[in-house]
Every structure is written in C-alpha cells, then in structure tokens.
Image: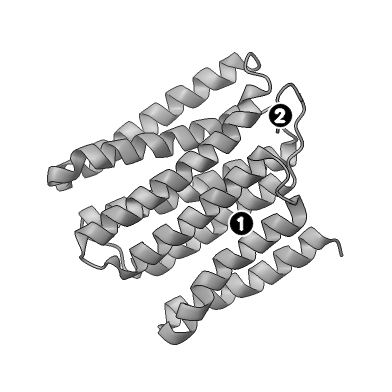
Amino acid sequence: MDKKTVYSLGYALIFSLALLAGISGWNNLLVLLHPLVYLYLMLYLQQCASLKGRFHKRLLKGLILSFLADILFRYAGTNTSLYLGALFSFLIAHLYFISAFYLDFKSAQELDKKGAKWAIGSSAIVFSLFYLQIRSHLGAYRLPVIVYIFIVSLLLMMALFRNRRVNTQSFRMVLAGVIFCVLADAGLLYGHFTTGISNASTWIFALYMIALYLIISGGVSRELIYKQTEV
C-alpha cells in the first residue's frame, strides 16, 4: 500500500473510535482522541505533501485554527464568549482554506466563466434561504452570523471555482469536504440559536472530521492543470 492509503486507513480507525466515544459518552477517551484526530491530519498533510508550496501551508494553518475552534466549541456550552471565539477561529480557518483555493482559481482566472456564475448564483440562493430560516433567533448576533455565513458561502464558491483548474480527484474530494463543512457550520449555527440538536457536538464533530479529511486528501492529491502561478 502507498503512503496515502496507509494514512487514510489509520485516520479511519482514529475517527471511528472518536465517534464511538462521543456517541457512548466515553469522555475520558474522547479527550485523548479529539486532539489526536487533528494531529494525525497535520502529520498526514506534512508527510504526503511535504508543505513545500503556499497551497499546502495554507491548508495546514486552516487545520490548526480548526483545532483551536473545536477546543473552544467543545467547552463553550452556554458561554456566548467561548462560542463566538469558536466561530471566529472557524472563520479564520475558512479564510485560510479560501486563500489556498484561490491559488488554484488564480492559475486560470478566465476559465469556465459560466460555471463561476452558476456557483455564485446557487451559493447566494442557498445561504440566503438558510439565513432567513434562523434570522428571527439571532437577536443581537445578526451581524456576526451574516459575516460568518458570507465566509462559508465564499468557501463553497472557491471550492467550485477549482473546477477544470486542478485534477478531477482533487476537485471532487475538496468539494465534497467543503459540502460536509457547510453542513457542520449550519448545524453549529442552527443548534446554538434555535431549538438545538440532540448530540449536536458529536455529530458536528463527525461532519467536520469528514470535511477536513476530504479537504486535506484533496490537497495531497492536487495537481494544477495550468501552472501560471506559484503553487
């Protein structure tokens, strides 16, 4: 087996154990496995991509900030300050991912304008509808939530903009990862500001872990089709 397959199988094992611990309420085991999941992804990225270019370095920074956000979210409970700190860390992590994907878009900016218009239009509709769904529950937090939703929509658009600029495997894996990330972000916002979701922290953690694995794996397998800019 090649290195990527070995790391993927190892990640599947750690992720499965962490998910089982979350569902079963094995909190002591979960305290160990939570950081291990992120550290393992960082090792996977470093070993399989070598962190030579700007793209992979930005993915690593996004991963580190996602780790910080996860810690804050885990201990936030009803503490609004910690919750907003988690949102802010996730937001900065998303910006690093966006800046990484922008490098791929920048390699051939004039390519697939029709696809770009479709990505912008569909993202605007979906995220506007989601905001309207939760708007009445936001109170004084409407502005930060609007900013957060805008950044998440930009993340999805930039993932779509990679189409035809990178190899198909990388494009599909990163896009799938971003979709899982969007679902996790939606659960994070909906669960906090509305009626709540049963076992929310476990399922949001699971969605983010799937999302990050797919984004990192897509980054590892990335091959630029048009190499007009530094990667």
- Image-quadrant location for residue 146: top left
The picture places residue 57, in percent across and down from the top left corner, at 63, 46
Q: Count residues near mark 2 (Cα–Cα under 10 Å), then give few for <14, some for 14-19, many for 20+.
A: few
Name which of mark 1 and mark 2 comes first in the sequence. 1
Q: Is residue 155 above or below residue 2?
A: above
Give the amino acid type for the residue marked by disc 1 in the picture: Tyr
Q: Indicate the quadrant containing the N terminus: top left, top right, bottom left or bottom right.
A: bottom right
Residue 208 in the figure: left or right of residue 102 = left
Residue 34 in the figure: left or right of residue 46 = left
Distance, label 1 to label 2, CA atoms, is 25 Å
Q: Count residues near mark 1 (Cα–Cα under 10 Å), then give few for <14, some for 14-19, many for 20+.
A: many
Res 21 visible: no
Res 210 visible: yes
Residue position marked by numbered label 2 in the rendering: 230
The picture places residue 157, in percent across and down from the top left corner, at 50, 31
174 and 130: which one is in front? 174
Contact between labelled residues 2 and 1, with CB atoms less than 8 Å apart: no
Q: Indicate the quadrant containing the C terminus: top left, top right, bottom left or bottom right.
A: top right
- Image-quadrant location for residue 161: top right
Tag 1 secondary structure:
helix
Give the amino acid type for the residue marked by disc 2 in the picture: Glu
Residue at the (63%, 67%) spot, across then down? 40
The picture places residue 218, in percent across and down from the top left corner, at 67, 46
Tag 2 secondary structure:
loop
Residue at the (42%, 65%) spot, across then down? 203
Q: How many marks?
A: 2
Q: Nearer the viewer, mark 1 or mark 2?
A: 2
Residue at the (34%, 39%) spot, across then down? 149
The picture places residue 163, in percent across and down from the top left corner, at 65, 29
109 and 193: which one is in front? 109
Disc number placed over residue 213 in the picture, else none: 1
Residue at the (22%, 58%) spot, across then down? 81
